[in-house]
Image (tube, grey):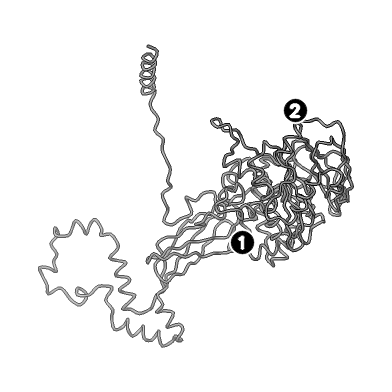
Amino acid sequence: DKNDLFEIAQWFPRMAAYYDAHGWQNKQYVGDGEFTLEFGDYDVELTVPADHIVAATGELQNAGAVLTAAQRERLARARTAGKPVVIVTQQEAEANEKQRATTMKTWRFKASNVRDFAWASSRKFIWDAQGFRKDGTNVLAMSFYPKEGNPLWERYSTQAIIHTIAEYNKYAFDYPYPVAISVNGPVGGMEYPMISFNGGRPVKDKKTGELTYSKNTKYGLISVIIHEVGHNYFPMIVNSDERQWTWMDEGLNSFMQFLAEQAWEDHYPSRRGEARNIVDYMKSRNQVPVMTNSESVTQRGNNAYAKPATALNVLRETVLGRDLFDFAFRAYAQRWKFKRPTPADFFRTMEDASGTDLDWFWRGWFYTTDHVDVSVDGISEYTVGTKDPEIEKAWKKAQHDLEPVSVTDQRNQGTLPRRVDSHPELKDFYNEHDAFTVTNRDRNKYNEALGDLDDWERNLLKEGKHLYLVDFGNVGGLVTPLILEITLASGKKYVERIPAEVWRYNPKKITKLIVTDEPMVALTQDPNWETADTDTSNNSWPRKAVPSRLELYKTERDKDNLMRDFNEKLKKVDK
């Protein structure tokens, strides 16, 4: 409609960054390694057509010069409102679209302690806002979008901004800036301090002509706003070197995005974070380690976003537990806000704050392309011998009776005359008893053995525990905790969690002792798919059948007959 929407970023020379660990960061931006910048204070004047609305990093300093009295009143009301307040209405924006101002206005913004400045300007903008205040955060969440963004943007954008800040504050630190902005325009998703550019719009329904949106569009918009607003924390404040390590901002932020998405509603369709969602990538061949320079990363989405996000979720849910992980992660965010951490700083802080040695975890997930594939290779069953001959010989007889009868004995039965049957005088004590008969000698030996035992040792013999030696193989190479779901003969199930340190003496094969009160009938490793195990077919004992589907295809002859029938029907239609 010849009404342009401008999104302006990377528009002025910025200082090269210098930091203690590596000195000057002078790598050029060639596509994937984004930014590493210094903090500064900005006082910016933007002169635009008088009918334009401007969104920018920082706080507006001269609202009286650029907004109407009604707009200023709405803006003031928005700070304490319980839902978004429209500052520039759709009717006002549509009126702006129909005119072409011949005069200019200058908008002035100030921003303190930020590492960049971006802005957007258009006469098309609808503008809504809502304040959010809690603990150390006092922020005005604002959205700028054209009418083409509704009804989607007016319903979700500002709400998603506030939700992001509320959730990220829990796990990192209180949002320190005065504004947070989401702008709808040509850029699908890009982040700058206090302002982000986000795509996603409704489409016209072919039948009604009304604007509507799909499920993917709705959740795609919410997710991209969470992600881009979330970048204010990582790397806008925890100022990691994106030019060197993409995962330190994209991966950490994708992990935080996953937590925020899950807090939006039940069964939120998150793309990244769940271990089961990374399996296909983890077993693929075209990989490089996460700890690869940004410009040399392959499969950027999987490598820099999904894999580190999944790794942190596994660390939180399976390795450390939520309480310990959340404490350590918050310690990292707070120690390194407005500073420039390296990967080693993140690794060390997580270990220091959690009090846990995690070198095996960082090595596997971040420095290799190994994957999790633990195989249950075999199980040996044992029970504790009671030494009581009455019990032990009965147990041996029961085991003997389970053995198959030999073919020779089967064929001799009833067909081979026996001498002792025709001469009963040949039978003696040994014909009346077998090897499983308990003798007085057995009883005396047992009583002598009991006399040498302490009370706790006698009790141990009576407990009747079942012992299983379970062999595990590390097929994928990535060390992981074991999560074992054990099913007993009574139907009872329970989960036993074994830390990854069980692999420390042999990272390829281990044997674990499982002790149960009753016979074990089944065992499954990683029953909830929480470790990104790439092959679940070898996770169970006994092995489970793998369900799949077959598709039936017609033969060439069947296809020829089908086409002939189809062509015959076409001829009838023509007639």
The label on residue 2 is 2
Against 111, residue 10 (above or below) is above
Q: Nearer the viewer, mark 1 or mark 2?
A: 2
Residue 470 in the image: state x and y as whole percent: 48, 62
Q: Depth check: 150 or 256 in front? A: 150
Residue 319: assigned label: 1
Under circle 1, the secondary element is: helix
- Residue pushed farthest left? 422
Give the side of residue 380 with respect to residue 205, left or right: left
Asked if labels 2 and 1 touch by Cβ distance under 8 angstroms, the answer is: no
Quadrant position of the C terminus in the picture: top left
Farthest-out residue, top: 575
User: In terms of image quadrants, where is residue 12?
Assistant: top right
Check the image and report above or below for 286 versus 207. below
Q: Tell whether 402 sits left or right of 513.
A: left
Q: Is residue 119 visible?
A: yes
Identify which residue, 65 or 1, lies in the foreground. 65
